[in-house]
Image (tube, rainbow, N blue to C red):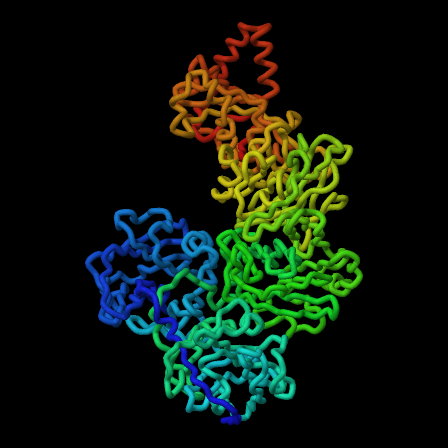
Amino acid sequence: MMVVSLARVACLCLAAVVVSGNPCLIISEVNADNPRLDTTEFVELYHTSGQRASLEGYTLVFYNGNGNIAYKVMDLKGHSTDDRGFFLVGSVDMLPKPAILLPPNTVQNGPDAIVLYRTSAARYSEKMNVTAVGLVDAVVYMTRRTGGAEFLAETLTPGEPAFVEDETALDGDESIERCLLSEDRWGFQVSSPSPGQRNNCTPPAAPATNPVITELKLGGGQVDGFVELSEAPAAGPVVLVVLDGKTDRVSVSVDVNVETSKNGLISVTIEKNYMKGDESGAVAIYSGRATDFPVGSPLSQIQPLDAFVFAGPGNKPSANLTETLIPGRQPYQLSNSLREGGFYLSRCGVATWARDPGVFWEAPQTPEQPNQCPWPKICPHSIVTPGGTDSPPHLPPWGNSDFLINELNTDTPGAAEDGEYIELWHPSGRRVSLQGIWILLFSAHNNKPYREISLSGHFTTSKGYFLIGSDRLVPAPSLRLPPNTIQNGPDAVAVYRSPSGPPSAAQRGIPTKGLLDAVVYRQRGSDKEAQELSKALTPGQLPLLEDPEVLTGDEALSRCRGLYPYDLSAFSVAPPTPLRENLCPRPPPAPEGVVISEVSSGHWTNHSQQRAFVELHGPPMTDLQGLVLTVFDQERSGTVIALPLTGSIDQDGFYIVGNVTGADQTFQDGSTVPVRGAVVLCYDLFSVCRAGTALTNSSLRDVLVFSENQQLLYSLSTARGRQVFPAVRSVEDGPVSLSRCSCCEVRSPSSWTSSSPTPDGTNLCPSPAFSSHIDLCLGPLSSDWQEQSANCSALIQGKRVAEVAHYLEQRCHCGISALYLQGANFSCGSGWLRVWGNIQALSDHQKALIIQTSHMNPSPAQGDVCSSPTMGRYQSKVSALGLQIGLIVAVLLLLGLGAALFTYFYKRRRPMDYYTMELSEHAEGLSDL
C-alpha cells in the first residue's frame, strides 16, 4: 500500500445514481442453447422495483430469424413476478421451477429474437411478421455458425447488431445476461446461467496494456482518500494525478508501484485535505512519471489512460477539464449531504471503455478484492445489444462503409467562435454505435493532435448523424466543446477506429492506422503550411478552403459529391446544416438519354477475366455532370459505391466505370459490384443517391436490381417487374455480365439478359440467327388467367410474356427472358395458353442448352385442351424450317396435299404435357428470367 501525504481533506459527498427512475419490466436473461439436449432453456423477466409486480397486459413473443415470423406467443395475463421481481419461463427440468413450463427444445438457438410487448395481446399471434408496435424490450441473438439476424436487429433493436452467443465462451452452459453498461445504458454479455437470481454482471477484465480505476474512496473530511487501479505491466511506468477543479492544476502526482499489486490490483492511499467535497476535481492515470506532472502544473493535453471527474454542489469543473479528461461525458455529481466516513465508489458498469464516471456506483469498499456491485434499479432508456464475444462490440455490420466526416465548420462569424462543429455521418443512414471511434484535431504548426476525443458510449441519430460542437450551437451537439476549440487552419480533422485506445498511443508521428476519414483545411495563403498533414491524411490533394466570401453570413464545408474517405473533392462550401441533409449546390440540368447498358460483378464467376464494371450508354459526347452512380449491396444493407460521374459519353456512345482496361472512372478502395444488390443511376443532389434516403421517381434515371431483397425492390420502385440474375450457363466457359437489350424501357428487368461481357462495345443480345422452334401448351400460371378473353389480347400484350419466360427459365437456367420470345406467337382458349413460333438465343452454345433441356423433359400427352380450331394447334415433329416451308406451300399451292399431311401428322401426334413443349428435332428451348 502506498501512502502520500496530502495537505487538505475535504468532504466528498456523492449523489446516489443508478437508482432513480420509475421501475419497469425487462428481459433479464435468456438461455436458448444448452449442452447436448436443450432441457434447461429459460427466459427470465425482471421488474426493476425488486418486488412483486403484476404482468397484466404483457405479451412475450418468440421470433424465428429464418423468415422473421413468430413461432410462439405467450400472453402473461394472470401472472406476477416473485417477491424479488423475477419471473421465469422455461423447460420442465429447470431449477428453480419456472412459472410457465415449456417442452424441451422450445426456445430456438438463433438467429432469433425474444420480444416483450405491452399492448393488447390480441395483436400478436403465431406466424405473424415481426413488429415493433408495443415493444417494451427485446433481445436479438445468433451464433457464429448461423448469422442471419440482421433484419430482426434492424426492426427490434435499430442501430445495433444481433448479440453473438459464443457457446465456447465458458465450460458447460452459458446464457445471455443483461447488464448495465454505464449510467442508464444497458447491454448483454455471456455468463454462467443464474435463473431467478441476480445476473453475473462483472466488469470486463482490464487489458494488459491499459490500467483502469476500479475503486475510489472520496474522503468525508476526517478520512484518507483511496484509489484502486488494475495492474497493467505492459503499460510501462504509470503515474496517478489528482487535479483541482477550480484551477485545472495538479494537486498531487505519484508514481504507481506495480510491486505492491495483489490479485492484479494496486491500492494508493491519499491522505487528507486535497479534494474538497464542496468543490470539484479529478483523478487521472497517465503513462509516465510523477516528474512529468509536477504539483502546480496546468492540465496536460496528453490523453489519460483513465480518468474520473467529479462535481461539487454548485461547483462544476471547467469545460476544459471535463472535455479533456472525459470527452463527451458528464462528471460524477456530488450530493449536498455529508458522510463522515466518506463515499465508496466501485467500477460496476460492464462497459469496455475507460474515462467514464458513469460506470461507477456506490458500493462497499473491497480493497484488492472483486467489487461487490448492487443490482441497478433503473429502466433502459434505449435498448442496447452490443456484439457478443465473437467480434469487437458495436462493430457495424456494413462492412467497409464506415463513419465519414459529413460537414465541418471551423470558422464562425464574430470573435466568440461559439458555433463551430464537426458532423459525422454513417452511410447506413441509421442509429449506429460509436464505440472505439476517435476524433483527432491536428495543428499544422507541429503536425500533432492538439485534442483527442473518444466517442465510445455514444450513438448516432436515427439518420446516422453525430454532432460535436460548441456549447451554444443549435441544435445542441451530443458532445460539447468549449468555444473556439476547433482551430481555423491550416489544420486537420481526422476520424479513427481505435478500440484499444487513442490512435496517437499506437503510432508515432501522424497516425494513419485505423484512419476512417480526414479533412485538411486552410485559410487563404496557408496551404503550404499543411503539407505534412496533407501528405499523411489526404495524399495528393490540396487543403480545403472554407471561404467566407462565398456566402453571406456563415458557411461550412459540406460533403456533396461522394462517399469515399479522404476525398476532399467531395466537399463544397455550403450553408451550415448540422444534423440535417447537406444543402449542396444544385447540379446542372439532367442529361437525357443516358441509361445503364451493362453490369458485371467480379464475383459472378471464377473466370480469370471476370471483372467488375458498369457500362452506361447515351448520346455521344453527353456531359454526365449531375448524374450519380450508386451501387447497393444486399448483404451490407446499404451503399457500397456512390460515385458522382465526371466527363462525357465517348464518341461511340459509351462510358465505363469499374476495374477494366480503358475505364473512364474506377471503383476506389476495394469497392466493387456485389453478388446480389442493385445498380442505380440517379440525378439530383448527391444526398438523394446514398443509403438511408428515399429515392424518388424524379431522381431515378435507371435501375438494375439483381437481388431478391423485397425492401430493396420496393425502395427502388421496381416492384412492377421481376429482378434479373446472371445465368452463368448462358455463356461457355467465360465471364458473364447482364446486358441491356431493349433500348427504350428503363427500370425494367424485361430489358436485360445474361451474356458475355462487352465493355465499350455492342451488347450481345438474343438473335434470330440462333433461333429454335417452340410449341408450348400451358395451363393457368396465375389465378387471373381465367378472367382473360378468348383471344388473349390483353394477356399476350402484358406482363404474361415475362411469366412464360420465367416458366421456361425455371427448367433451363440458361438466361431466357421475355426478350427471347420476340418471335413467338400467343393464343389461348379455355384458360390454356399456347405459345408457338421461334425462341431466340445468344449463341450456338445457348441454343444447345435449350435443346438439351427439351431432351431431358419429354412431352407426355395432355389431352385436347390446345387443339380447338381457334387455337390452330401445331403438331409437327419435323424441323422448324421444314414445317414453316411446308405450311406456306400447303396454304398457297397445295391445299389438298396439306389436308393429307394434316391427317398423317394427326395420327402420329402425342398429347402434350402441362409443363413441357414439343420441339423440332433440330432445335427447341426452355429457359427464363
Q: Is residue 901 left or right of residue 758?
A: left
For residue 858, above or below residue 125 = above
Q: Is residue 640 left or right of residue 225?
A: right
- Which residue is pictured at 48% across the width and 27% down the height? 800
- Which residue is pictured at 47% across the width and 83% down the height? 276
- Could you say where residue 851 lies in the image, as x and y percent from the top left? 57, 32
- Could you say where residue 432 lies in the image, as x and y percent from the top left? 51, 58
Front residue of this view, candidates 531 and 927: 531
Front residue of this view, candidates 171 and 292: 292
Q: Is residue 567 left or right of residue 583?
A: right
Front residue of this view, candidates 612 and 831: 612
Q: Quadrant of residue 380?
A: bottom left
Q: Quadrant of residue 304?
A: bottom right
- Which residue is pictured at 47% across the width and 20% down the height? 794
For residue 788, above or below residue 127 = above
Name the residue furthest left.
78
For residue 19, above or below residue 134 = below
Q: Quadrant of the C terminus?
A: top right
- Which residue is pictured at 46% across the width and 66% down the height? 388
- Could you say where residue 280 lies in the image, as x and y percent from the top left? 49, 78
Can residue 921 be seen here? The reply is no
Can residue 767 be seen here? The reply is yes
- Could you say where residue 528 lies in the image, as x and y percent from the top left? 80, 61
Q: Is residue 906 left or right of residue 495?
A: left
Q: How many marks?
A: 0
